[in-house]
Amino acid sequence: MANLLITSGPTRQHLDPVRFLSNASSGRMGAALAEAALMRGHEVTIVSGPVTIDYPSAARVLPITSTDEMLATCRQVFPECDGLIGAAAPCDYRPVCVASSKISKTGAPITLHLVETADVIATLAEQRSPHQWVVGFALETDDQRFRALAKLERKSCDLIVLNGPSAIDSDDNEVEILDSKGATLGSFQGSKSLVARSIFNVVHRELIIPQLAVTSKPS
């Protein structure tokens, strides 16, 4: 049995007390991956941004709001886990300054100064121990396979799951799983529940079983 960390849902970066930058990630894929892992008897911790869906009751769920909060929470949890599946869609930018009160309309344009947020998956992958593995997700609109492989290398992932923008806030998904050599380990489409089970079958075969075989060897 493995202890897994799954990131899920969007994050929010506030502009003022009532407005924020975010995306339409629903958390459905994270929930479906957690269910697939639980069905195989693994332990699951979910670090999730704001969502309206329900996660499996058997999973430990740690709610967060911002990308920095997601990273900080994952840093606390990841050392006790065997692997990470980064299914979340963290907000990539944050405002330099957050207004303390609601920004009022003046009739004139406003300029937002944004900076990049921390890369959750890359940071955790860099700090992992030798026995831990990392699976990333890549949602791309152009040059999808090339960008996914570049992201896999940049983030030091063991596998990466490539999907497109149609996956956002959808009940269905179409994905391709790539390894560090660029080989396709599986292509799946259908409901997110079905696709998640197929993804997890690959993760189980390629990462969890080899890991358990090493840790179970007598010293």
Image (cartoon, grey):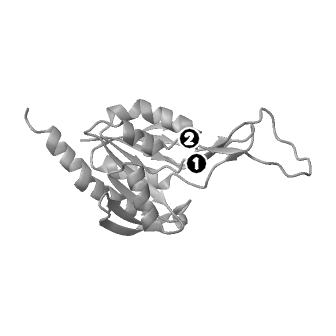
Q: Amino acid at mark 1?
A: Asp
Of the numbered discs in the image, which one, if any, rests on residue 157? none
- Mark yes or no: residue 39 visible: yes
Side of 166 relative to 4 (left or right): right
Q: Amino acid at mark 2?
A: Thr
> Residue 56 versus residue 34: which sits nearer the camera?
34
Residue 25: where, in percent of width, then height?
Answer: 56, 54
- Mark yes or no: residue 174 visible: no
The residue that appears at 29% across and 39% down in the rendered structure is 82
Residue 149: where, in percent of width, then height?
Answer: 40, 60
95, above or below 205, in the image:
above
> Residue 10 versus residue 100: which sits nearer the camera?
100
**Residue farthest along the top direction in this orientation:** 76
Looking at the rendered image, the quarter that the N terminus falls into is top left
**Residue farthest along the right direction in this orientation:** 107
Helix, strand or loop at mark 1 = loop
The residue that appears at 74% across and 37% down in the rendered structure is 17
Residue 214: where, in percent of width, then height?
Answer: 15, 42
**Residue farthest along the left direction in this orientation:** 218
Side of 72 relative to 182 (left or right): right
The residue that appears at 88% across and 47% down in the rendered structure is 105
The residue that appears at 73% across and 44% down in the rendered structure is 19
Looking at the rendered image, the quarter that the C terminus falls into is top left
**Badge 1 is on which residue?**
92
Residue 131: where, in percent of width, then height?
Answer: 25, 39
Helix, strand or loop at mark 2 = helix
> Residue 76 versus residue 48: which sits nearer the camera?
76
**Badge 2 is on which residue?**
67
Q: Classify mark 1: residues with Cα within 10 Å, few (<14), some (14-19) or many (20+).
A: some
User: Of label 1 and label 2, which has the lower sequence position?
Assistant: 2
Foreground disc of the pair 1, 2:
1
Q: Are marks 1 and 2 in contact (CB under 8 Å)?
A: yes
